[in-house]
Amino acid sequence: MGLQGTCLKTRNFLTPAALRECLRVLNFILITLRERFKAYLPHCKRHIGFPPIVLCCNLLNLEMKNASLSVAGLIPMLNLITLRLEFIRLDDEDLDKVNECFPFLQILKLIGVGGLRKPKIVLTQLRICHWTVSNFPLSLAIHAPNLVELKLECVEPKYLVLETPLLSQIDLKIKKPGGHIKVGSFLYLKSVRMETLYLKGIKQLFEGCQAVKKLELEEFNSSKTDESFGKFTVLDIISTFPNVNDLKLGPGAWNQLETSFVGCRDSYISCEWRNLKSLTIKLPPDDLNIATLSVLLKFCIPSCEVAVLLHKDSPDCTKNRIIARCAGNFPRYKWKWGIWKESCLDSFLDFQNDTNF
């Protein structure tokens, strides 16, 4: 059986000595490449090309980390289905060579890949794409007709193009779309997670996504919220995702919603989430007022399970008071209570065993 997968990890840049040691190990694994390695070593510079290991025609999986790579002379690898590049500087600013040489990729993960200017992924067989953009390219584009899962993290591209008609799951972290956004129809989209300053933009991005069942919204980590496009309201969620049955709101998203409830009248409540079965809210540490929660609950049907996570550093007496008031004022809902804190796993309370915080 031929070599089907390999992982290469290096320091910041491959020195000739470091590469020699790496290739010595690979040479032990794959004796047939010995002469290629010997020919390659004398020509190693700080900026290297893809090592000879990638010339294996039967290689299925390839992972490379911490290197500066040149694509000069890279030949097509028609059997490669999984490629992961992590903390790589790549001299393929538009990803043209990646598209050309790995045409049958099914899984592509680009984590902190630098050197990109107008990157465009054009892969017809791609099904899973995780892309964390490390710099500030002018535009980002993904043309993948069979893509079903996308995780994209970027800052503020001037142009964002997503042509992914079969997409089922998207995790999008973008500080703020800087200009033109072009997305195709997401008729099969079931799960959405979005983190951005511009939560109002969900209507622009996901209009017509009637099939979405799971939704999680959070505000991009910033000291200032951008309201230049208008306030984000609960009606933005209901009108865009009318069939959602699982909604999660992070503390930043909750802060944005709260401003839209100020001065809210009962006439504002004109519809319900008929299909909403689970509502999870992380209350900010400085906001333990149930007034806004009371307004939001008017959108929920009685069978909805409401989970509220309170910040760990909030006073215990305040947490207990909120629990008592919610249970007393809204007895028709099934309540769950938990604790959250930055960089920690969420935890839920079992009131049969936990008497306090």
Image: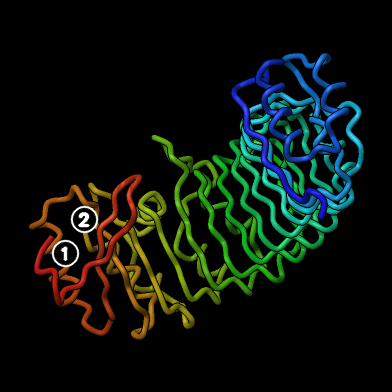
Can you give x and y, in whole percent of width and height, for residue 85 in the image? 68, 38
Left or right, 318 with reference to 298: left
Can you give x and y, in whole percent of width and height, for residue 11 in the image? 59, 24
Task: Give the structural element (helix, strand or loop) at label 1.
Answer: helix
Please tell me which residue is depicted at 39% across the width and 35% down the height of the picture.
223
177, 192: nearer the viewer: 192
Please tell me which residue is depicted at 63% across the width and 33% down the height of the picture.
9
Disc 2 marks which amino acid?
Answer: Leu
Can you give x and y, in whole percent of width and height, for residue 221 in the image? 43, 40
Which class describes the residues within 10 Å of circle 1: few (<14), some (14-19), or many (20+)?
some
Give the image quarter of residue 276. bottom left
Please tell me which residue is depicted at 53% across the width and 58% down the height of the picture.
193
Q: CA distance from mark 1 to mark 2?
A: 7 Å
249, 143: nearer the viewer: 143
Which class describes the residues within 10 Å of circle 2: few (<14), some (14-19), or many (20+)?
some
Left or right, 85 with reference to 325: right
Picture quarter with the C terminus: bottom left
119, 81: nearer the viewer: 81
Left or right, 140 with reference to 43: left
Q: Give above or below for 49 relative to 181.
A: above
Can you give x and y, in whole percent of width and height, for residue 293 in the image? 29, 65
Disc 1 marks which amino acid?
Answer: Ile
Q: Give above or below for 24 relative to 271.
A: above
Residue 182 visible? The answer is no
Left or right, 36 with reference to 83: right
Q: Which residue is mark 2?
A: 288
Residue 86 visible? The answer is yes
Q: Which residue is mark 1?
A: 322
Q: Are marks 1 and 2 in contact (CB under 8 Å)?
A: yes
263, 77: nearer the viewer: 77
Please tell me which residue is depicted at 33% across the width and 45% down the height of the picture.
342
